């Protein structure tokens, strides 16, 4: 599997590069706005890429997503979008390009997080309005978007388990009044070098159920991206996520 790695000189790019060989992958080149010396060529933009690849893995962030997707469309290459924090307009762009190429997009590439997502949805179905759902996510002090894409994934799972009867509330401040049953509270913590922690609390009368996941290393996301990339090769145009991946392994 030949891979073009976008965001090649960032922390996640380094993890993907170090784990590529054991996942049967070769990084043929990288793209990064701030190129550094690497074991493969790294270009400041896709305009300079001449190498051929089977798939693109993108850990570059949420800026200018259309340039990456346009490159993939022109080359007939599928892409794993491993970044989060895309705007509504970005999502419309992604949907448009998904008519031409296969795009793997998820808020989190960890196997454990995606299992947590399933458990949270089931809990919401069983517990119903008798329990209030709150999400707390914790990340390092360099993370730009809040709440995390994973927290939003978990909130959407609760919403689905509640037959879409819930609304999102992002933090609370001031005299907000009593909590509504329809709320899903989402709270972001930023500090230090926390890789990623997510906690979902279902609080009922006289009892609390807590489901949580803690990432101890970014390697789990790099491994997930490489596995998703291998799975995505040859897929028809459309948007795929971890539920599609799990259904076929």
Image (tube, rainbow, N blue to C red):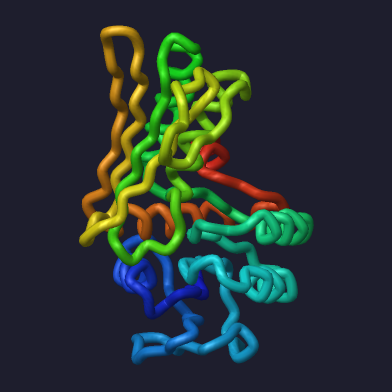
Relative image position of residue 71 (x, y in whole percent)? 68, 76
Relative image position of residue 2 (x, y in whole percent)? 50, 72
Relative image position of residue 159 (x, y in whole percent)? 55, 27
Location of residue 161 with respect to 151 vertically, above or below? above
- What is the tally of numbered marks visible in this picture? 0
Q: Is residue 69 left or right of residue 60?
A: right
Relative image position of residue 160 (x, y in whole percent)? 58, 25
Q: Is residue 112 visible?
A: no
Location of residue 169 with respect to 219 vertically, above or below? above
The residue lying at 50 percent from left, 81 percent from top is 31
Seen as rendered, the residue at the extreme front is: 175
Q: Is residue 234 left or right of residue 92?
A: left
Residue 128 versus residue 110: which sits nearer the camera? 128
Residue 32 versus residue 136: which sits nearer the camera? 136
Residue 114 versus residue 205: which sits nearer the camera? 205
The residue lying at 33 percent from left, 71 percent from top is 11
The residue lying at 38 percent from left, 72 percent from top is 13
Q: Is residue 55 visible?
A: yes
């Amino acid at each position: 599997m030949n891979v073009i790695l976008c965001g090649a000189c960032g922390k996640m790019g380094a993890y993907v590069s170090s784990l590529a060989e054991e996942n049967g992958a070769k990084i043929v080149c990288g793209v990064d706005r701030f190129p550094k010396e690497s074991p493969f060529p790294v270009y400041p933009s896709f305009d300079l890429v001449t190498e051929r690849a089977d798939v693109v893995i993108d850990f570059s962030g949420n800026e200018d997503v259309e340039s990456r997707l346009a490159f993939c469309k022109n080359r007939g290459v599928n892409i794993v979008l491993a970044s989060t924090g895309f705007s509504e307009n970005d999502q419309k762009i992604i949907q448009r390009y998904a008519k031409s190429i296969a795009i793997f997009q998820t808020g989190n590439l960890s196997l454990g997080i995606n299992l947590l997502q399933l458990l949270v949805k089931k809990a919401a179905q069983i517990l119903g309005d008798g329990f209030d759902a709150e999400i707390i996510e914790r990340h390092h002090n360099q993370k730009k978007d809040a709440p995390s894409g994973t927290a939003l994934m978990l909130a959407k799972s609760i919403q689905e388990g509640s037959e879409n009867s819930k609304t999102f509330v992002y933090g609370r401040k001031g005299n907000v009044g009593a909590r509504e049953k329809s709320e899903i509270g989402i709270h972001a913590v930023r500090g230090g070098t926390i890789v990623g922690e997510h906690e979902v609390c279902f609080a009922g009368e006289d009892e609390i159920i807590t489901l949580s996941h803690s990432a101890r290393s970014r390697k789990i996301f790099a491994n997930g991206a490489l596995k998703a990339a291998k799975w995505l090769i040859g897929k028809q145009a459309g948007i795929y996520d971890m539920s599609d991946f799990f259904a076929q392994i």
